[in-house]
Image (spheres, rainbow, N blue to C red):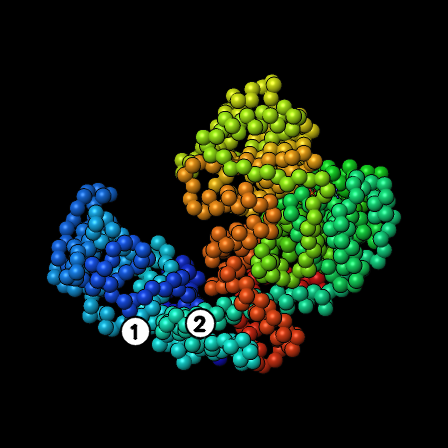
């Protein structure tokens, strides 16, 4: 039924075997459908022909003129060699410039002939200039399939070198349309189209490539965004339904001796209201006869670790093992040390498994784990290796989830015959839309309260020229007995990037803070694990004043006596990273500071990021801002968060409303047809398949 759309693009006029190969390799386009779902990234109005004389400034992104070639001339030499073509349309002159493909262009051009010239205008010495414009003879203009608003398609260098420009792609899509037009089956059920007033798929694909006008374009975009978000939501909800109906989960019926003794004898501070509430939510989940999948969001320093620890005690009280996976060894070590201390005397065996645990100790550890002699296993992603086998794993904590991909999350689930309860913790607040997409299958708990007595961190933005002032500031804090982090984006000097680096920073710092009066330590990602641990321990024990580091200390590290976080070349870091780094201070009762050092030359976006950091310490606010600053190109963000596929058209930062509607539609569709078995939903099934994440989990292994 979808026959034609599955055909290879090779048979589209103008493609052929060679180009088909390039299209697949570069853009993943294999079939007619893939091609029709390759949407323009922007649109330009090609119905309008400008007069040269009316283009006075550079405000228009692209313009089109109809002009006659007056002269063709080669200027400059070597890399400066360029082709200069002067054209006129009677209202003025314009200069067209090419630096590449000079010979080819020159051969094509005829003096005195009229061309349609299309490009980005710039005004140079009072004259209109266009660099590498597109040229079309006015004859071809009449043959164009459509004149009007036209899509621009993004291409790659490889495509361009195979002469597949945006314009050529457009031509190919025109040809593809002739083949596909009559054979585009609707993916959405008629009831959904009606209810949400959506454009049909055939029309939507037509107008997304060949929009008749703004209104139709908008309707086409809405429809395709809806389709995309619906498919994703259906997949997420199907997974969730599967878990809740098929997989009962272990029932942790009792809150027993270990939990109670810990609570009475060991707990070093009263829990905050938010911590208590979340522990209650977790208790209700694990006692309730269904497998828990909970996302715990809480800003840096909000005390998520204690929640994890106490939840694990419930598992142990019910005879199960628990584990916690951390993204770095430093963090795993830290958890190990604090857990061992907090749990001492309770008869609970805690073990640490990281890449540094090798040979015999590792063998013994694995054997004990399988026998059930270890109650709590703490580790890095070493935990998900196949050789790690539990006796009866009942509770899994994943710390700082944003650092792990969806797949890693899935692999821990398969560590028992039944799915263990899963608690995913993150301090990187995720905008609601992203959370709904990435973790739409999870229930969410939020710690929205910091432990008492914390003072909000003061954030300052200093330019390079204020370096001495920054040193003075550090000196004062150290004199008060506090400790200081200084974080660098690079370990050593880089030819490509003009940022501060740790090696040079070390020289400068030890000059300004000379030993033995001051002790400065270094920790970075390229160091041996044992050296990193040693450095961290010294700092933690207060044996050093200053810790120079790369972003290895970004997540989780807890040294309450550190009150200053200096971030060098702060413009190099994203908002969520800056916020994480800042979260390393302000963990004790003292006033803490974050100093953002940047060069004076800042892009508008970097400046906004610094302003945002200075203005707020609210991680949720920052994450929304982050999304907005990144704009529709938030792909990077989603990839970092472990999203396994790219959104083709919807934007999680802009299309929250459509996402809500799609979520509602998905819920209703599944209510009516839980496994999408009905005939009218079969096209939906196909659609969903296209948006499946990498195989998230192989259920046959567990049930
Ligand atoms: P995060 O949520 O960023 O993982 P942590 O769990 O590392 O935060 O906690 C940060 C610090 O706050 C730790 O030093 C921890 O001991 C402390 N802490 C946690 N809960 C409380 C509380 N209820 N009262 C006082 N201090 C607390
Ligand atoms: Mg933490």
Q: Residue at x 83, y 45 (%)?
A: 263
Q: CA distance from mark 2 to mark 1?
A: 19 Å
The x and y percentages for residue 426 are 64, 50
Q: Residue at x 57, y 78 (%)?
A: 681
The residue closer to the viewer here, 336 or 118, is: 118
Q: Is residue 167 left or right of residue 676?
A: left
Residue 207, picture quadrant? bottom left
Q: Is residue 302 left or right of residue 235?
A: right
Q: Is residue 681 left or right of residue 34?
A: right
* Residue 114, placed above or below residue 478: below
Residue 160, picture quadrant? bottom left
Q: Residue at x 14, y 51 (%)?
A: 73
Q: Which mark is residue 145?
A: 1
* Residue 467, placed above or below residue 291: above
- Ligand 1 quadrant? top right
The x and y percentages for residue 448 are 68, 50
Q: Is residue 602 left or right of residue 424?
A: left
Q: Which mark is residue 220?
A: 2
Tell me if I can see residue 363 in this picture.
Answer: no
The local secondary structure at tag 2 comes to helix
């Amino acid at each position: 039924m979808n026959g034609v759309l599955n055909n290879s693009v090779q048979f589209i006029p103008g493609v052929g075997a060679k180009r088909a190969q390039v299209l697949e390799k570069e853009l993943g386009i294999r079939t007619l459908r893939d091609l029709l779902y390759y949407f323009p990234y922007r649109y330009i109005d090609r119905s309008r022909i400008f007069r040269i004389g009316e283009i006075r400034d550079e405000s228009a992104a692209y313009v089109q003129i109809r002009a006659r070639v007056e002269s063709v001339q080669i200027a400059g030499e070597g890399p400066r060699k360029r082709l200069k073509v002067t054209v006129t349309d009677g209202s003025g002159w314009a200069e067209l410039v090419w630096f590449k493909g000079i010979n080819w262009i020159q051969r094509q051009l005829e003096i005195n002939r009229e061309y349609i010239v299309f490009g980005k205008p710039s005004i140079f010495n009072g004259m209109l200039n266009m660099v590498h414009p597109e040229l079309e003879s006015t004859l071809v203009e009449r043959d164009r399939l459509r004149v009007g608003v036209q899509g621009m398609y993004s291409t790659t260098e490889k495509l361009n070198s195979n002469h597949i420009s945006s314009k050529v792609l457009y031509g190919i899509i025109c040809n593809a349309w002739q083949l596909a037009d009559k054979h585009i089956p609707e993916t959405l059920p008629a009831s959904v189209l009606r209810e949400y007033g959506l454009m049909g798929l055939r029309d939507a694909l037509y107008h997304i490539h060949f929009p008749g006008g703004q209104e139709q374009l908008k309707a086409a975009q809405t429809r395709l965004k809806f389709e995309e978000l619906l498919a994703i939501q259906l997949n997420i909800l199907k997974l969730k339904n599967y878990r809740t109906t098929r997989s009962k989960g272990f029932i942790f019926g009792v809150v027993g001796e270990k939990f109670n003794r810990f609570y009475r004898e060991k707990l070093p501070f009263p829990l905050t209201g938010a911590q208590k509430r979340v522990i209650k939510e977790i208790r209700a989940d694990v006692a309730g006869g269904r497998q828990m999948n909970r996302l715990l969001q809480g800003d840096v320093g909000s005390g998520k670790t204690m929640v994890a620890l106490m939840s694990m005690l419930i598992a142990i009280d019910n005879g199960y093992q628990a584990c916690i996976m951390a993204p770095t060894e430093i963090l795993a070590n830290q958890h190990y040390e604090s857990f061992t201390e907090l749990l001492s005397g309770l008869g609970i065996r805690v073990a640490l498994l990281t890449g540094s645990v090798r040979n015999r100790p590792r063998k013994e550890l694995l054997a004990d784990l399988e026998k059930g002699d270890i109650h709590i296993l703490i580790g890095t992603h070493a935990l998900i290796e196949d050789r790690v086998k539990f006796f009866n794993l009942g509770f899994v904590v994943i710390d700082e989830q944003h650092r792990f991909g969806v797949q890693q999350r899935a692999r821990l689930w398969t560590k028992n015959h039944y799915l263990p309860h899963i608690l995913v913790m993150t301090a990187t607040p995720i905008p609601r839309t992203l959370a709904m997409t990435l973790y739409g299958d999870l229930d969410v708990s939020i710690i929205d309260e910091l432990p008492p007595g914390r003072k909000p961190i003061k954030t300052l933005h200093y330019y390079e020229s204020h370096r001495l002032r920054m040193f003075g500031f550090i000196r004062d804090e150290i004199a008060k007995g506090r400790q200081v982090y200084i974080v660098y984006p690079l370990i050593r000097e880089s030819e490509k990037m003009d940022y501060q680096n740790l090696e040079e920073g070390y020289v400068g710092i030890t000059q300004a803070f000379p030993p033995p009066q001051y002790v400065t330590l270094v920790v970075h990602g390229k160091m041996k694990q044992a050296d990193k641990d040693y450095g961290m321990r010294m700092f933690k024990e207060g044996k050093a004043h200053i810790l120079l580091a790369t972003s290895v200390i970004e997540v989780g590290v807890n040294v309450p006596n550190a009150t200053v976080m200096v971030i060098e070349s702060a413009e190099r870091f994203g908002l969520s990273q800056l916020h994480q780094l800042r979260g390393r201070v302000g963990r004790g009762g003292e006033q803490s500071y974050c100093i953002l050092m940047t060069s004076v030359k800042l892009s508008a976006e970097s400046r906004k990021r610094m302003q945002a950091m200075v203005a707020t310490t609210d991680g949720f606010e920052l994450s929304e801002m982050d999304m907005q600053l990144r704009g529709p190109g938030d792909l990077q963000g989603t990839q970092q968060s472990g999203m396994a596929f790219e959104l083709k058209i919807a934007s999680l930062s802009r299309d929250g409303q459509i996402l809500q509607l799609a979520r509602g539609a998905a819920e209703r569709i599944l209510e009516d047809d839980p496994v999408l078995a009905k005939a009218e939903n079969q096209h939906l099934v196909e659609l969903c398949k296209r948006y499946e994440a990498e195989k998230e989990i192989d259920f046959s292994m567990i049930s």
